[in-house]
Image (cartoon, rainbow, N blue to C red):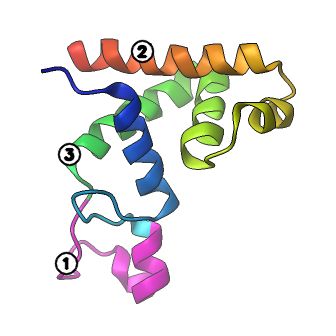
């Protein structure tokens, strides 16, 4: 069964915001806010590391950031910022249709990335 790319992007967005996702993981920014600067060290016990599904999406987004920066910015507004299409499009100074096509492009590109 193929994972739902949009759901994976939502989980990644939650991780990036510092919130917990279904597996109970928290990101490094949350750990630093909670435990101080030493929390970024990998030997700090007790905190779970990035879940594998979030890690795959993070690698995809890093590639997206390098090669399709305009799509990456839309993804950040929509999945991390949890902004509506209208608000995010206004911030990016594009139309809502273009914004939604960029989100669709990101989801379909993640589908292809996962198949590869």
Comparing labels 1 and 3, the label whose residue is closer to the camera: 3
**Residue 116 seen in the current view:** no
Residue in front for this viewpoint, 113 or 94: 94
Q: Of 73 and 41, which appears nearest the observer?
A: 73
Question: Which residue shows up at 36% across the image and 64% down it?
Answer: 20
Vertical placement of residue 14 versus 53, above or below: below
Question: Can you tell which quarter of the image residue 115 is in?
Answer: top left
Query: Which residue is labeled 2 in the image?
Result: 109
SS under mark 3: helix
Write down the residue under mark 1. Answer: 43
Q: Say which quarter of the image contains residue 55.
A: top left
Quadrant where the C terminus sits is: top left
The crowd level at tag 2 (other Cα within 10 Å; few <14, some 14-19, many 20+) is some
Image mark for residue 52? 3
In the image, farthest residue toward the bottom = 35
Q: Which residues are magenta?
A: 29-49
Tag 1–tag 3 contact (CB < 8 Å)? no
């Amino acid at each position: 069964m193929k994972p739902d790319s949009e759901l994976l992007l939502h989980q990644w967005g939650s991780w990036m915001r510092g919130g917990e996702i279904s597996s109970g993981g928290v990101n490094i920014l949350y750990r630093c806010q909670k435990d101080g600067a030493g929390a970024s060290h990998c030997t700090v016990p007790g905190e779970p590391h990035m879940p594998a599904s979030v890690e795959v999406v993070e690698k995809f987004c890093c590639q997206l950031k390098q090669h399709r920066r305009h799509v990456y910015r839309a993804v950040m507004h929509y999945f991390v910022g949890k902004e509506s299409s209208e608000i995010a499009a206004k911030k990016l100074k594009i139309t809502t249709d273009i914004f939604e096509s960029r989100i669709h492009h990101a989801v379909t590109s993640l589908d292809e990335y996962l198949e590869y």
